[in-house]
Image: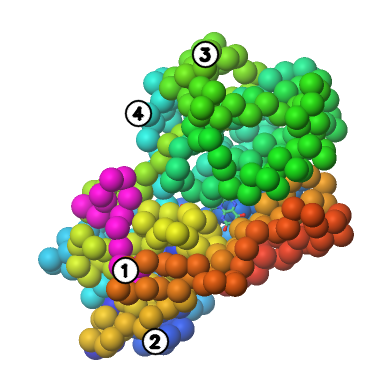
Amino acid sequence: AAPSFVVIGGGPGGATTAKYIRRFAPDARVTVIEPNATYTTCFMSNEVIGGDRDISTLQVPMSAMRAHGITLVQDKATGIDADAKTVTTQGGETIAFDRCIVAPGVDFRYDAIEGYSAEAAEVMPHAWKAGPQTTLLRAQLEAMEDGGTVIVSAPPNPFRCPPGPYERISLIANYLKQHKPKSKILVLDAKDKFSKQGLFEQAWETFYGYGTENSMIEWVPKADGGTVTGVNPATMEVTAVAGTFKGDVVNIIPPQTAGAIAHAAGLVEDGWCPVNKGTFESLVVEGVHVLGDSSVAASMPKSGSSANSQGKAAAAGALALAMGQEPPVPHLANACYSIGGPDHGFSVAAVYAYDDFENALKPVEGSGGVSPMDAGPESRRREMFYAHSWFENIKADIWG
Ligand code: FAD
Protein backbone atom coordinates (compact mmCIF):
# COMPACT_ATOMS: atom_id res chain seq x y z
CA ALA A 1 0.00 0.00 0.00
CA ALA A 2 1.05 3.62 -0.44
CA PRO A 3 2.93 4.96 2.59
CA SER A 4 1.02 7.02 5.16
CA PHE A 5 2.16 10.17 6.90
CA VAL A 6 0.72 12.04 9.86
CA VAL A 7 1.77 15.69 10.06
CA ILE A 8 1.33 17.53 13.37
CA GLY A 9 0.80 21.27 12.79
CA GLY A 10 -0.56 23.17 9.78
CA GLY A 11 1.91 26.08 9.97
CA PRO A 12 4.63 26.77 7.40
CA GLY A 13 6.63 23.66 8.34
CA GLY A 14 3.77 21.16 8.53
CA ALA A 15 1.66 22.47 5.63
CA THR A 16 4.64 22.59 3.25
CA THR A 17 5.67 19.04 4.12
CA ALA A 18 2.13 17.72 3.65
CA LYS A 19 1.66 19.45 0.30
CA TYR A 20 5.05 18.39 -1.07
CA ILE A 21 4.70 14.73 -0.01
CA ARG A 22 1.52 14.66 -2.12
CA ARG A 23 3.30 16.42 -4.98
CA PHE A 24 6.20 13.97 -4.93
CA ALA A 25 3.94 10.91 -4.45
CA PRO A 26 0.32 11.55 -5.45
CA ASP A 27 -0.80 8.21 -3.97
CA ALA A 28 0.72 8.87 -0.49
CA ARG A 29 -1.82 9.15 2.33
CA VAL A 30 -1.26 12.37 4.26
CA THR A 31 -3.17 13.54 7.34
CA VAL A 32 -2.57 16.95 8.93
CA ILE A 33 -3.63 17.45 12.56
CA GLU A 34 -4.14 21.14 13.42
CA PRO A 35 -6.49 22.58 16.08
CA ASN A 36 -7.14 25.90 14.32
CA ALA A 37 -9.44 26.25 11.29
CA THR A 38 -7.50 29.38 10.30
CA TYR A 39 -3.76 29.97 10.52
CA THR A 40 -2.57 33.53 11.17
CA THR A 41 0.94 34.23 9.91
CA CYS A 42 3.44 35.91 12.19
CA PHE A 43 5.14 37.20 9.06
CA MET A 44 3.89 40.72 8.34
CA SER A 45 2.18 40.82 11.76
CA ASN A 46 4.53 43.67 12.73
CA GLU A 47 2.82 45.72 10.02
CA VAL A 48 -0.51 45.08 11.78
CA ILE A 49 1.02 46.24 15.06
CA GLY A 50 2.36 49.38 13.34
CA GLY A 51 -1.09 50.09 11.84
CA ASP A 52 -0.09 49.54 8.20
CA ARG A 53 -2.02 46.31 7.50
CA ASP A 54 -5.27 44.57 8.41
CA ILE A 55 -4.96 41.27 10.29
CA SER A 56 -7.30 39.55 7.80
CA THR A 57 -4.45 39.62 5.25
CA LEU A 58 -2.47 37.30 7.55
CA GLN A 59 -5.21 34.66 7.76
CA VAL A 60 -5.28 31.50 5.67
CA PRO A 61 -7.94 28.76 5.83
CA MET A 62 -6.59 25.32 6.67
CA SER A 63 -9.32 23.75 4.52
CA ALA A 64 -7.37 24.79 1.38
CA MET A 65 -5.07 21.81 2.04
CA ARG A 66 -7.90 19.45 1.07
CA ALA A 67 -7.45 20.50 -2.57
CA HIS A 68 -4.15 18.56 -2.50
CA GLY A 69 -5.84 15.38 -1.30
CA ILE A 70 -4.68 15.91 2.27
CA THR A 71 -6.93 14.69 5.10
CA LEU A 72 -7.42 17.42 7.67
CA VAL A 73 -8.17 16.60 11.30
CA GLN A 74 -9.15 19.66 13.33
CA ASP A 75 -7.79 18.53 16.67
CA LYS A 76 -4.72 18.72 18.87
CA ALA A 77 -2.15 15.91 18.92
CA THR A 78 -1.46 14.79 22.50
CA GLY A 79 0.98 11.90 22.06
CA ILE A 80 3.11 9.97 19.60
CA ASP A 81 3.75 6.24 20.04
CA ALA A 82 6.80 5.65 17.84
CA ASP A 83 6.71 1.85 18.43
CA ALA A 84 3.03 1.42 17.65
CA LYS A 85 3.37 4.14 14.96
CA THR A 86 0.29 6.05 16.06
CA VAL A 87 -0.61 9.60 17.06
CA THR A 88 -3.34 10.22 19.62
CA THR A 89 -5.45 13.37 19.74
CA GLN A 90 -7.29 15.34 22.39
CA GLY A 91 -10.56 14.39 20.67
CA GLY A 92 -9.80 10.70 21.27
CA GLU A 93 -8.62 9.64 17.81
CA THR A 94 -5.72 7.27 17.18
CA ILE A 95 -4.17 7.74 13.73
CA ALA A 96 -1.61 5.30 12.29
CA PHE A 97 1.46 6.35 10.29
CA ASP A 98 4.49 4.95 8.52
CA ARG A 99 6.31 8.23 9.22
CA CYS A 100 5.27 11.10 11.50
CA ILE A 101 6.16 14.75 10.85
CA VAL A 102 6.17 17.15 13.81
CA ALA A 103 6.10 20.93 13.22
CA PRO A 104 4.42 22.54 16.26
CA GLY A 105 6.47 25.77 16.32
CA VAL A 106 7.61 27.28 19.62
CA ASP A 107 6.23 27.43 23.13
CA PHE A 108 7.12 30.04 25.71
CA ARG A 109 9.30 29.46 28.76
CA TYR A 110 7.05 31.45 31.05
CA ASP A 111 9.02 30.29 34.10
CA ALA A 112 12.10 32.23 32.86
CA ILE A 113 10.45 35.60 33.75
CA GLU A 114 8.98 35.87 37.25
CA GLY A 115 5.36 36.97 37.15
CA TYR A 116 4.92 36.28 33.43
CA SER A 117 2.32 33.71 32.31
CA ALA A 118 -0.41 33.17 29.72
CA GLU A 119 -2.67 35.32 31.95
CA ALA A 120 -0.05 38.08 32.28
CA ALA A 121 0.23 38.07 28.48
CA GLU A 122 -3.36 39.39 28.37
CA VAL A 123 -2.00 42.59 29.97
CA MET A 124 1.57 42.52 28.64
CA PRO A 125 1.19 40.77 25.26
CA HIS A 126 3.98 38.77 23.65
CA ALA A 127 2.34 38.94 20.20
CA TRP A 128 4.87 36.25 19.21
CA LYS A 129 2.06 33.95 18.02
CA ALA A 130 -0.12 35.97 15.70
CA GLY A 131 -3.85 36.43 16.24
CA PRO A 132 -5.60 38.03 19.25
CA GLN A 133 -2.19 38.85 20.79
CA THR A 134 -1.32 40.91 17.69
CA THR A 135 -4.54 42.93 17.79
CA LEU A 136 -4.24 43.37 21.58
CA LEU A 137 -0.80 44.97 21.26
CA ARG A 138 -2.07 47.16 18.40
CA ALA A 139 -5.09 48.29 20.47
CA GLN A 140 -2.85 49.15 23.43
CA LEU A 141 -0.60 51.29 21.23
CA GLU A 142 -3.66 53.09 19.85
CA ALA A 143 -5.01 53.72 23.36
CA MET A 144 -1.67 55.01 24.73
CA GLU A 145 -1.35 58.77 25.28
CA ASP A 146 1.32 60.81 23.51
CA GLY A 147 4.38 60.87 25.75
CA GLY A 148 3.98 57.27 26.90
CA THR A 149 6.68 54.63 27.20
CA VAL A 150 6.54 51.36 25.26
CA ILE A 151 8.76 48.63 26.69
CA VAL A 152 9.82 45.79 24.39
CA SER A 153 11.76 42.88 25.89
CA ALA A 154 13.78 40.86 23.38
CA PRO A 155 14.62 37.21 24.18
CA PRO A 156 17.94 35.34 24.27
CA ASN A 157 19.01 33.13 21.34
CA PRO A 158 17.77 30.89 19.89
CA PHE A 159 14.26 32.15 19.19
CA ARG A 160 11.65 32.46 16.42
CA CYS A 161 12.56 35.14 13.86
CA PRO A 162 15.86 36.73 14.96
CA PRO A 163 15.18 40.10 13.22
CA GLY A 164 11.50 40.14 14.32
CA PRO A 165 11.78 42.17 17.56
CA TYR A 166 13.78 44.88 15.78
CA GLU A 167 11.39 45.13 12.85
CA ARG A 168 8.60 45.46 15.42
CA ILE A 169 10.48 48.25 17.23
CA SER A 170 10.95 50.03 13.89
CA LEU A 171 7.27 49.82 12.95
CA ILE A 172 6.06 50.87 16.42
CA ALA A 173 8.47 53.84 16.19
CA ASN A 174 7.07 54.66 12.74
CA TYR A 175 3.53 54.74 14.18
CA LEU A 176 4.52 56.79 17.24
CA LYS A 177 6.48 59.30 15.16
CA GLN A 178 3.36 60.07 13.14
CA HIS A 179 0.74 59.96 15.90
CA LYS A 180 2.43 60.23 19.34
CA PRO A 181 5.81 61.89 18.73
CA LYS A 182 6.61 62.56 22.41
CA SER A 183 6.58 58.82 23.18
CA LYS A 184 9.59 56.55 23.74
CA ILE A 185 10.45 52.90 23.17
CA LEU A 186 12.67 51.22 25.75
CA VAL A 187 14.18 47.97 24.46
CA LEU A 188 15.40 45.58 27.14
CA ASP A 189 17.48 42.93 25.43
CA ALA A 190 18.89 39.63 26.70
CA LYS A 191 21.55 39.82 23.94
CA ASP A 192 24.50 42.07 23.09
CA LYS A 193 23.98 41.93 19.36
CA PHE A 194 21.16 41.09 17.00
CA SER A 195 20.32 40.14 13.41
CA LYS A 196 20.89 42.84 10.73
CA GLN A 197 21.91 45.20 13.56
CA GLY A 198 23.83 47.64 11.35
CA LEU A 199 20.89 47.98 8.97
CA PHE A 200 18.35 48.42 11.77
CA GLU A 201 20.49 51.01 13.55
CA GLN A 202 20.96 52.86 10.28
CA ALA A 203 17.16 52.93 9.79
CA TRP A 204 16.65 54.08 13.39
CA GLU A 205 19.18 56.90 12.85
CA THR A 206 17.50 57.91 9.58
CA PHE A 207 13.93 57.91 10.84
CA TYR A 208 13.82 57.98 14.65
CA GLY A 209 16.81 60.04 15.84
CA TYR A 210 18.70 57.00 17.13
CA GLY A 211 22.03 57.94 18.66
CA THR A 212 20.90 61.52 19.43
CA GLU A 213 19.43 62.98 22.63
CA ASN A 214 16.03 62.98 20.97
CA SER A 215 16.08 59.33 20.01
CA MET A 216 12.68 57.68 20.14
CA ILE A 217 14.40 54.31 20.74
CA GLU A 218 16.68 53.38 23.63
CA TRP A 219 18.29 49.93 23.36
CA VAL A 220 19.71 48.35 26.53
CA PRO A 221 21.85 45.31 25.68
CA LYS A 222 22.60 42.42 28.01
CA ALA A 223 25.98 43.95 28.94
CA ASP A 224 24.13 46.99 30.35
CA GLY A 225 21.62 44.87 32.27
CA GLY A 226 18.95 44.48 29.57
CA THR A 227 17.94 40.92 30.51
CA VAL A 228 14.39 40.92 31.88
CA THR A 229 13.93 38.80 35.02
CA GLY A 230 10.44 39.70 36.21
CA VAL A 231 7.22 41.58 35.49
CA ASN A 232 4.31 42.95 37.48
CA PRO A 233 1.24 43.31 35.27
CA ALA A 234 -0.69 45.07 38.08
CA THR A 235 1.78 47.98 38.17
CA MET A 236 3.04 47.65 34.55
CA GLU A 237 6.59 47.32 35.88
CA VAL A 238 9.35 45.33 34.23
CA THR A 239 12.42 44.29 36.19
CA ALA A 240 15.68 43.80 34.31
CA VAL A 241 19.21 43.29 35.61
CA ALA A 242 19.70 47.09 35.22
CA GLY A 243 16.66 47.99 37.37
CA THR A 244 12.88 48.32 37.35
CA PHE A 245 11.10 50.28 34.59
CA LYS A 246 7.45 51.28 34.22
CA GLY A 247 5.75 51.10 30.83
CA ASP A 248 2.44 52.30 29.45
CA VAL A 249 2.51 49.46 26.92
CA VAL A 250 4.67 46.40 27.62
CA ASN A 251 5.53 43.80 24.98
CA ILE A 252 7.29 40.83 26.57
CA ILE A 253 8.79 38.41 24.03
CA PRO A 254 9.71 35.53 26.33
CA PRO A 255 12.48 32.95 25.99
CA GLN A 256 11.33 30.02 23.86
CA THR A 257 11.49 26.25 23.47
CA ALA A 258 10.10 23.58 21.12
CA GLY A 259 6.31 23.14 21.03
CA ALA A 260 4.74 21.13 23.88
CA ILE A 261 3.95 18.04 21.77
CA ALA A 262 7.67 17.69 20.94
CA HIS A 263 8.40 17.60 24.68
CA ALA A 264 5.56 15.13 25.32
CA ALA A 265 6.89 12.84 22.56
CA GLY A 266 10.42 12.82 23.99
CA LEU A 267 11.93 14.58 20.95
CA VAL A 268 13.62 17.40 22.89
CA GLU A 269 17.17 17.82 24.15
CA ASP A 270 18.26 21.15 25.69
CA GLY A 271 15.00 22.82 24.75
CA TRP A 272 14.93 21.92 21.02
CA CYS A 273 14.72 18.86 18.77
CA PRO A 274 17.99 17.56 17.32
CA VAL A 275 17.53 16.15 13.80
CA ASN A 276 19.34 14.78 10.81
CA LYS A 277 19.53 18.06 8.88
CA GLY A 278 19.17 16.31 5.53
CA THR A 279 15.89 14.43 6.18
CA PHE A 280 14.78 16.16 9.41
CA GLU A 281 14.36 12.75 11.05
CA SER A 282 14.72 13.03 14.81
CA LEU A 283 18.07 11.92 16.25
CA VAL A 284 16.17 10.77 19.36
CA VAL A 285 13.09 8.93 18.04
CA GLU A 286 13.30 6.89 14.83
CA GLY A 287 10.57 7.30 12.21
CA VAL A 288 9.59 10.75 13.47
CA HIS A 289 10.71 13.94 11.67
CA VAL A 290 10.81 17.41 13.23
CA LEU A 291 11.19 20.65 11.28
CA GLY A 292 10.55 24.36 11.51
CA ASP A 293 11.02 26.35 14.70
CA SER A 294 11.03 23.26 16.97
CA SER A 295 14.07 21.71 15.27
CA VAL A 296 17.78 22.39 15.64
CA ALA A 297 18.57 23.39 12.05
CA ALA A 298 21.44 25.79 12.66
CA SER A 299 22.90 27.60 10.86
CA MET A 300 19.44 28.25 9.41
CA PRO A 301 17.47 30.76 11.48
CA LYS A 302 14.03 29.95 12.88
CA SER A 303 11.90 31.55 10.17
CA GLY A 304 8.86 30.83 8.03
CA SER A 305 11.13 30.89 5.02
CA SER A 306 13.39 28.24 6.61
CA ALA A 307 10.38 26.13 7.67
CA ASN A 308 9.07 26.23 4.10
CA SER A 309 12.42 25.10 2.66
CA GLN A 310 12.85 22.44 5.35
CA GLY A 311 9.34 21.17 4.59
CA LYS A 312 10.42 20.23 1.07
CA ALA A 313 13.57 18.46 2.32
CA ALA A 314 11.57 16.67 5.03
CA ALA A 315 8.94 15.61 2.47
CA ALA A 316 11.56 14.14 0.13
CA GLY A 317 13.49 12.53 3.02
CA ALA A 318 10.47 11.02 4.77
CA LEU A 319 9.08 9.70 1.50
CA ALA A 320 12.38 8.05 0.49
CA LEU A 321 12.80 6.45 3.92
CA ALA A 322 9.18 5.23 3.95
CA MET A 323 9.80 3.50 0.61
CA GLY A 324 13.17 2.02 1.65
CA GLN A 325 15.13 4.29 -0.66
CA GLU A 326 18.26 6.38 -0.11
CA PRO A 327 17.15 9.91 0.88
CA PRO A 328 18.30 12.75 -1.41
CA VAL A 329 20.95 15.23 -0.23
CA PRO A 330 19.16 18.60 -0.17
CA HIS A 331 20.06 22.22 -0.59
CA LEU A 332 17.97 24.59 1.51
CA ALA A 333 17.38 28.35 1.44
CA ASN A 334 16.24 31.17 3.65
CA ALA A 335 15.34 34.78 2.89
CA CYS A 336 14.23 37.14 5.66
CA TYR A 337 13.01 40.62 4.79
CA SER A 338 12.64 43.35 7.41
CA ILE A 339 10.96 46.73 7.23
CA GLY A 340 12.77 49.54 9.06
CA GLY A 341 10.66 52.55 8.09
CA PRO A 342 8.52 54.03 5.32
CA ASP A 343 9.55 52.47 1.98
CA HIS A 344 12.60 51.08 3.71
CA GLY A 345 13.22 47.33 3.44
CA PHE A 346 16.33 45.16 3.70
CA SER A 347 17.07 41.46 3.85
CA VAL A 348 19.35 38.58 4.68
CA ALA A 349 19.42 35.46 2.52
CA ALA A 350 21.46 32.28 2.18
CA VAL A 351 21.55 28.94 0.41
CA TYR A 352 22.62 26.03 2.62
CA ALA A 353 24.24 22.78 1.53
CA TYR A 354 23.72 19.68 3.66
CA ASP A 355 26.98 18.12 4.79
CA ASP A 356 26.06 14.55 5.83
CA PHE A 357 29.47 13.85 7.36
CA GLU A 358 29.08 16.66 9.91
CA ASN A 359 25.24 16.72 9.89
CA ALA A 360 25.55 20.45 9.18
CA LEU A 361 23.75 22.97 7.01
CA LYS A 362 26.52 25.17 5.64
CA PRO A 363 25.94 28.47 3.81
CA VAL A 364 27.13 28.09 0.22
CA GLU A 365 29.96 30.48 -0.44
CA GLY A 366 28.95 33.38 -2.66
CA SER A 367 25.21 32.77 -2.15
CA GLY A 368 22.97 35.25 -0.36
CA GLY A 369 24.30 37.84 2.06
CA VAL A 370 22.92 40.94 3.73
CA SER A 371 21.65 44.10 2.00
CA PRO A 372 24.52 46.57 1.59
CA MET A 373 24.80 49.34 4.17
CA ASP A 374 25.39 51.94 1.44
CA ALA A 375 22.34 51.08 -0.70
CA GLY A 376 20.31 54.13 -1.68
CA PRO A 377 16.61 54.87 -1.07
CA GLU A 378 15.54 53.28 -4.38
CA SER A 379 17.11 49.97 -3.35
CA ARG A 380 15.46 50.14 0.10
CA ARG A 381 12.13 50.94 -1.56
CA ARG A 382 12.48 47.95 -3.87
CA GLU A 383 13.28 45.63 -0.95
CA MET A 384 10.06 46.75 0.74
CA PHE A 385 8.24 45.77 -2.45
CA TYR A 386 10.13 42.43 -2.52
CA ALA A 387 9.13 41.84 1.12
CA HIS A 388 5.46 42.19 0.22
CA SER A 389 5.73 39.97 -2.86
CA TRP A 390 7.70 37.37 -0.84
CA PHE A 391 4.76 37.35 1.59
CA GLU A 392 2.19 36.63 -1.14
CA ASN A 393 4.43 34.01 -2.78
CA ILE A 394 5.25 32.09 0.39
CA LYS A 395 1.60 31.98 1.44
CA ALA A 396 0.75 30.53 -1.98
CA ASP A 397 3.59 27.98 -1.83
CA ILE A 398 2.67 26.80 1.68
CA TRP A 399 -1.13 26.85 1.73
CA GLY A 400 -2.18 27.62 -1.85
P1 FAD B 1 4.24 27.62 13.52
O1 FAD B 1 4.09 28.67 12.53
O2 FAD B 1 4.14 27.99 14.96
O3 FAD B 1 3.11 26.53 13.23
C1 FAD B 1 2.91 25.49 14.13
C2 FAD B 1 1.48 24.98 13.99
O4 FAD B 1 1.36 23.78 14.76
C3 FAD B 1 0.44 25.96 14.54
O5 FAD B 1 -0.57 26.15 13.58
C4 FAD B 1 -0.07 25.26 15.80
O6 FAD B 1 -1.46 25.52 16.04
C5 FAD B 1 0.16 23.79 15.48
N1 FAD B 1 0.32 22.94 16.64
C6 FAD B 1 1.10 23.16 17.75
N2 FAD B 1 0.96 22.13 18.61
C7 FAD B 1 0.12 21.25 18.03
C8 FAD B 1 -0.41 19.99 18.45
N3 FAD B 1 -0.11 19.46 19.64
N4 FAD B 1 -1.27 19.35 17.62
C9 FAD B 1 -1.59 19.87 16.40
N5 FAD B 1 -1.13 21.07 15.97
C10 FAD B 1 -0.28 21.74 16.79
N6 FAD B 1 9.58 34.33 9.20
C11 FAD B 1 9.97 34.66 7.94
O7 FAD B 1 10.44 33.81 7.19
N7 FAD B 1 9.86 35.94 7.49
C12 FAD B 1 9.35 36.93 8.25
O8 FAD B 1 9.26 38.08 7.81
C13 FAD B 1 8.93 36.62 9.58
N8 FAD B 1 8.41 37.57 10.37
C14 FAD B 1 8.03 37.26 11.64
C15 FAD B 1 7.55 38.26 12.47
C16 FAD B 1 7.16 37.99 13.77
C17 FAD B 1 6.64 39.08 14.66
C18 FAD B 1 7.26 36.65 14.26
C19 FAD B 1 6.83 36.33 15.66
C20 FAD B 1 7.74 35.64 13.44
C21 FAD B 1 8.14 35.93 12.14
N9 FAD B 1 8.67 34.94 11.30
C22 FAD B 1 9.07 35.27 10.02
C23 FAD B 1 8.91 33.57 11.81
C24 FAD B 1 7.85 32.55 11.42
O9 FAD B 1 6.57 33.01 11.79
C25 FAD B 1 8.12 31.20 12.09
O10 FAD B 1 9.47 30.86 11.98
C26 FAD B 1 7.26 30.12 11.46
O11 FAD B 1 5.91 30.38 11.75
C27 FAD B 1 7.64 28.72 11.92
O12 FAD B 1 6.80 27.78 11.33
P2 FAD B 1 6.46 26.41 12.07
O13 FAD B 1 5.60 25.66 11.11
O14 FAD B 1 7.70 25.78 12.58
O15 FAD B 1 5.61 26.82 13.38
Q: Which residue does the image show at 45% across and 43% down from the upper left?
A: 157
In the rendered image, which residue does mark 2 sit on? 25
* Label 3 Cα crowd, 10 Å radius (few <14 / some 14-19 / many 20+): few
256 versus 362 height, above or below: above
* Label 1 Cα crowd, 10 Å radius (few <14 / some 14-19 / many 20+): few
**Residue 32 vs residue 385, the one in the foreground:** 385
Find out if the beta carbon at label 2 lies less than 8 Å from the nearest ligand 1 atom. no
- Badge 2 marks a residue whose secondary structure is loop
367 versus 346 height, above or below: below
Q: Which residue does the image show at 56% across and 66% down from the upper left?
A: 350
**Badge nearest the viewer, 3 or 2:** 3
- Provide residue 159's location: percent of width, then percent of height: 46, 45
In the rendered image, which residue does mark 4 sit on? 111
Q: CA distance from mark 3 to mark 1?
A: 43 Å
**Residue 18 vs residue 326, the one in the foreground:** 326
In the rendered image, which residue does mark 3 sit on? 243
- Badge 1 marks a residue whose secondary structure is loop
**Badge nearest the viewer, 2 or 1:** 1
Furthest-left residue in this view: 83
Whether pointer 3 and pointer 1 mark residues with C-beta atoms closer than 8 Å, the reply is no
Q: Of the residues shown, which amino acid type is indicated by label 2?
A: Ala
Q: Counting residues from the N terminus, which is met first, the one under dot 4 or under dot 3?
A: 4
In the rendered image, which residue does mark 1 sit on? 358
Q: Of the residues shown, which amino acid type is indicated by label 3?
A: Gly
213 sits to left or right of 309: right
199 versus 291 height, above or below: above
- Provide residue 373's location: percent of width, then percent of height: 74, 53
**Residue 367 vs residue 253, the one in the foreground:** 367
**Badge nearest the viewer, 3 or 1:** 1
- Badge 3 marks a residue whose secondary structure is strand
